[in-house]
Amino acid sequence: MPSTRRDRAAGEGAERDVLDLGGYVPYFLTAISNTWSRSSSRLYLERFGVGVTEWRVMSQLAIEPGIAAQRICEVIGLDKGAVSRSAATLVAAGHVAERPDARDARRQLLELTPSGYALHDRLIALATAREQLMLEGFSPQERAQLLDFLRRLQARLPALRDYVPPSGEGG
């Protein structure tokens, strides 16, 4: 399915390529991600006093206790500033503890505190229920196929980051 279509430009009379959102993969990824994140953040803030970025930091700390903020950025793909702000918020709330890295005194390692784990356990139940809601109607085979497609897209991210268009393309 092509991701562009020919369309007459308003007021110009000329035809040009425009995005066909129904066939443009980045549109779907962005729309799903933005809506999911905004609704998650609103719900998590109302129920637990933390936003979706704090939840992402907490979930990574539950998976890998005692890691630096940079590792969270690498795994989740979040901006360093966002992770630092979220970690500071969680430290101030008593959900995350910092300790110096024995190998590099300039780095702080982060880990969930007992209250952080308790909050994580409440949040994960809601997060996985929302995931199930989104996947309702998909067969186990379709879910596996969707995950395969998403992993393959994720594996292409380094090529996307390094892409330099040939001269004359995009500007």
Image (spheres, rainbow, N blue to C red):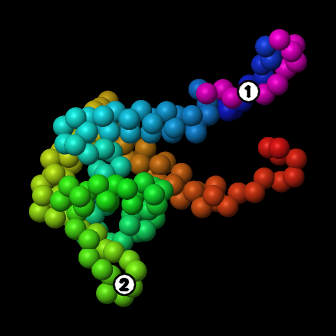
Q: Amino acid at mark 2?
A: Ala
Q: Secondary structure at mark 2?
A: strand
- Reply yes or no: does residue 30 show up in magenta: no
Taking the image as shown, residue 59 lies to the left or right of residue 77, namely left
Q: Please state which amino acid type lies under the numbered disc 1.
A: Val
Count up the numbered dots. 2
Please tell me how crowded label 2 is: few (under 14), some (14-19), or many (20+) other residues with Cα within 10 Å: few
Q: Position of residue 5 (x, y in %)?
A: 74, 25
Q: Earlier in the sequence, mark 1 or mark 2?
A: 1
For image coordinates 18% across by 37% down, the residue present is 47
- Residue at x 42%, y 32% (from the top left corner): 35
Does 109 sit above or below residue 145? below
Q: Which mark is residue 155?
A: none
Identify residue for label 1: 18
The single residue placed furthest to the bottom in the displayed view is 103
Q: Position of residue 137 (x, y in %)?
A: 32, 30
Magenta-tinted stretch? 11-21
Query: Real-space Cα distance between discs 1 and 2?
Result: 52 Å
Is residue 15 one of those drawn in magenta? yes
Residue 141: in sight, yes or no? no
Q: Is residue 102 above or below residue 38?
A: below
Q: Is residue 56 left or right of residue 79?
A: left
Q: Nearer the viewer, residue 102 or 14?
A: 102
Provide the residue designation for mark 2.
Answer: 105
Q: In the rendered image, is residue 116 in sight?
A: yes
Whether residue 33 sits left or right of residue 62 in the image: it is: right
Q: Dividing the image into 4 quarters, which one contains the N terminus? A: top right
Q: Identify which residue, 29 or 104, lies in the foreground.
A: 104
User: What residue sits 30% from the left and 80% below the top?
Assistant: 100
